Image (spheres, grey):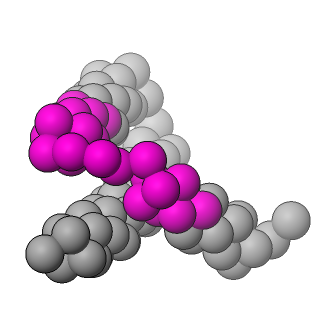
Amino acid sequence: MTEQNNWKQFSDDISNMSKKIKSNITDEKNVDDLKNSLKAAKESIADSFSELIQIVETTVSDEEIKKDALNIVNKLKFEMSNFIETSKEKMSDLVNLDTSEEE
């Protein structure tokens, strides 16, 4: 599977998850729980990338390998950041849609 197909699959998975959440969101408590869970996941991922960067910087002695490894980690961090932002936007749209349907 190509990298582009992998990201398309992630996007499709988020869309499917959004549909499931939309059908299960029943009150504000669930929305708050979802927001807190997403925030915790985002913080955990950010911490993991920071730790990975620290490990590469402190353990890899070859400068060329270190530079390449940090480049890969930073690309992954960027892709995950975009993925999280896209997910957040989809969730926000979903919550706004549910709120407006209830009014």
Front residue of 88/22: it is 22
Instruction: Read off the magenta span.
Output: 16-43
Residue ID at (27%, 68%) = 98
Is residue 38 shown left or right of residue 20? left
Q: How many callouts does the rendering have?
A: 0
Q: Does the rendering let one see residue 99?
A: yes
Residue 28 falls inside the magenta stretch: yes
Residue 83 falls inside the magenta stretch: no
Residue ID at (21%, 45%) = 27
Front residue of 59/46: it is 46
Where 13 falls versus 98 (above or below)? Answer: above
Residue at the front extreme of this rendering = 103
Q: Position of residue 64 (x, y in %)?
A: 46, 51
Q: Position of residue 61 (x, y in %)?
A: 40, 29
Where 66 falls versus 40 (above or below)? Answer: below
Front residue of 17/25: it is 25
Front residue of 101/82: it is 101
Helix, strand or loop for the magenta stretch, by majority: helix
Where 93 falls versus 59 (above or below)? Answer: below
Rendering quarter of residue 29: top left
Looking at the rendered image, the quarter that the N terminus falls into is bottom right
